[in-house]
Image (cartoon, rainbow, N blue to C red):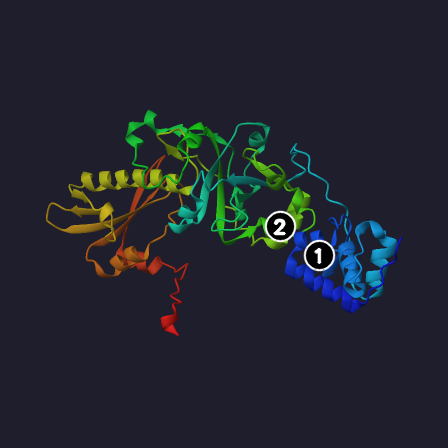
Amino acid sequence: MATPDVTAEDVVEALEEFDRLGRRDFLAKYGFGKSRSYFVRRDGKLYDSKAVVGAAHTRRHGVPLRAADFSGGEATVKKILEGLGFTVEVREPVRPTSSAVTEESLGAWVMKCNPEVWDVAGFIADGGQVIDDWTVVQNYRSDMIRYGQRVLLWVTGSVSGPVPRGFWGSGWITGDVQGLIDIAEDPGSAIDTADFDYWLDREARDRMRFAAPMNLRLWYRPVTETELLTIPGLDQLEVIRMRQASNPSWVSTEQLALLEPLLPAWPEIGPPAEELITIDAHHAGVGDPLTRAVVESSAIRAVEDHYRSAGYTITSVERDKCGWDLTCTAPDGAVERVEVKGVSGSQPTILLSRNEYRSAQKDAGWVLAVVTRAVTAPKVAIYSAEEARTAAEPLVYQLNLSPDLR
């Protein structure tokens, strides 16, 4: 077997070519497989050591040096690279994870989203940032789901394109899996879900019967499968090896350790879910939009009851997008322009749109009605426009970066 004859400059050029081509094309070009144990570490990245040395030798001598032409490992590749001043990291091979999840092996649950079934791009375009629940099948895995476990969102899109395949968000499980409720059994809760339903495949939606509550935040940009495959061992993720498997999928503790350097910081864990309230007339739902729809519908009814009991007449202006939801007129003619916000829990933390905040600044009689425990035990609190403005804090700034501004 040949002994590779390379210089440090040859190795640097091979590493730079690795970066330009990407791992898959680099290995294919020089006829090498993925390293199992020995990796060159440079600028925080790992490179397949045997392929790098083989490519460096080929570049210097113009003669292909294939994997079968020399032995790797401690005696050759590691010795050559360290002798040239490079750092070689030795890792235990990442073996395919058993499909059986245990409490000890679980790193995080993975919920998969097919963008042809559920419109994740539309959800984001509409301002969606947090997913409160996700449908799962009932099996031993879903029986293991508990408060405080980590969860990731995987989108099964294309390798490239507007919805690239990869991880799109992270967060925490907030309770046990629960059966979905049919609101047809409770006509008083019926709502028009047309504006809130992001399901693109109605038949798939109708098959769902169970969902896991969570607090999962979408990221500014996804971590794509292409990026993941540059990390040795992550090609063994179940979502990559078994693309057709049902929810929930999972990553092991070992895989999560490899993943975390690529991921944004985990959001803070929220309180346990009191009740799963994702409900629609088709026995199923996924994600925050339907949750929000049910909460807001319940909140509106509670505020209407509150003002009606005080003798007000009520006109709904929800569809007018004027900065408030209800125009409430007292017997003496006084008008309150009521913006309604509902939350499912007991903490009155809400968001105001720019239009709503503008109305709180300019429109006479504007008030904020916040309904806590909107679905289970609604409690209405009324805040003046001044109180709302004082409590408001900006969370996001929109930037207009058009060329005309330069």
Query: Judging from the image, what secondary structure is the residue with disc 1 in?
Result: strand
Query: Judging from the image, what secondary structure is the residue with disc 2 in?
Result: helix
The image shows residue 204 at horizontal and vertical percentages of 44, 31
Give me the C-alpha separation between circle 1 and circle 2: 12 Å
Q: Nearer the viewer, residue 195 or 11?
A: 11
Q: Nearer the viewer, residue 320 or 267?
A: 320
Disc 1 + disc 2, Cβ < 8 Å: no
The image shows residue 260 at horizontal and vertical percentages of 62, 51
Q: Residues within 10 Å of mark 1 (few under 14, many from 20)?
A: some
Residue 125 drawn above or below residue 118: below
Is 291 displayed left or right of 268 in the figure?
left
Q: Residues within 10 Å of mark 2 (few under 14, many from 20)?
A: some
Q: Which circle's residue, 1 or 2, is located before the other in the chain?
A: 1
Residue 292 drawn above or below residue 183: below
Outermost residue toward the left in this view: 332
Residue at 52% x, 30% y is 137
Query: Which residue position is annotated with label 1?
Result: 46
Q: Which mark is residue 403?
A: none
Q: Nearer the viewer, residue 354 or 46?
A: 46
Is 375 displayed left or right of 112 in the figure?
left
Residue 207: tell me if it is visible. yes
Query: Which residue position is annotated with label 2?
Result: 228
Q: Nearer the viewer, residue 239 or 178?
A: 239
Disc 1 residue type?
Leu
